[in-house]
């Protein structure tokens, strides 16, 4: 399935969870911080940025997380396996030319950016940047798609 997308975002919503998908606007180095090392990967314009909320909730924090990565290039933190905080991580991010969703990985502990933790209902998706938008494969029935125009306005006073 091809989804046209300019500078906006795509909300992929199931009954209990959602993904927020955007495309990188510019080239930057994304740092991924683990407990033992710092990994840096190049991000190119058009790469996909996927924020996953496996338990659903409000979309606004996902919008802010998207903006922190896409515009401000904030590093990503990866928790070690069995870290007690991983069960409280409500939203996770992956950035790559193509991102696959999986419900079999533990939230916040996977440094490989081609995978993102998702709920069962959104598992098995493949999301790839396309010159005109996004190409999504593995879309199950009953999933709602919505494009969102989003820009954070900061008070300059």
Image: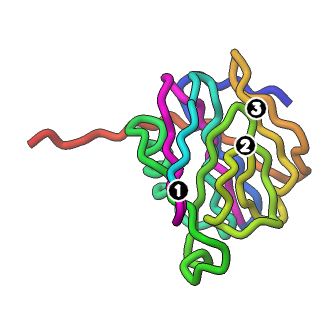
Magenta-drawn stretch contains 115: no
Q: Residue at (59%, 52%) from the top-left corner?
A: 93
Q: How many residues crowd around disc 3 within 10 Å: few (fewer than 14), some, or many (20 or more)?
A: many
126 versus 82 height, above or below: above
Q: Residue at (66%, 74%) from the top-left corner?
A: 81
Rendered location of residue 3, percent (x, y)? 75, 28
Residue receiving disc 1: 37
116 versus 16 height, above or below: above
Picture quarter containing residue 122? bottom right
Which dot, 2 or 1, sits closer to the camera? 1
Q: Nearer the viewer, residue 79 or 57?
A: 79
Residue receiving disc 2: 145
Q: Which image quarter is the C terminus in?
A: top left
Which dot, 3 or 2, sits closer to the camera? 3
Q: Which mark is residue 128?
A: 3
User: What stretch of residues is rendered in magenta?
Assistant: 17-36
The CA span between labels 2 and 1 is 37 Å
Q: Is mark 3 in CB contact (under 8 Å) with mark 1? A: no
The CA span between labels 3 and 1 is 28 Å
């Amino acid at each position: 399935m091809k989804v046209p997308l300019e500078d906006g975002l795509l909300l992929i919503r199931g009954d209990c969870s959602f993904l927020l998908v955007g495309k990188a606007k510019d080239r930057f180095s994304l740092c991924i911080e683990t407990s033992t090392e710092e990994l840096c990967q190049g991000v190119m314009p058009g790469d996909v940025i996927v924020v996953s909320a496996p338990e659903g909730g409000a979309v606004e924090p996902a919008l802010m997380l998207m903006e922190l990565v896409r515009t401000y290039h904030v590093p990503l933190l990866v928790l070690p396996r069995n870290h007690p905080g991983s069960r409280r991580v409500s939203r996770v991010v992956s950035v790559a030319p193509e991102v696959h969703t999986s419900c079999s990985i533990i939230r916040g502990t996977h440094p490989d950016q081609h995978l993102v933790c998702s709920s069962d209902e959104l598992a098995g998706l493949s999301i790839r940047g396309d010159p005109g938008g996004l190409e999504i494969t593995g879309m199950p029935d009953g999933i709602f798609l919505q494009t969102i125009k989003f820009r954070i306005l900061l008070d300059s006073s």
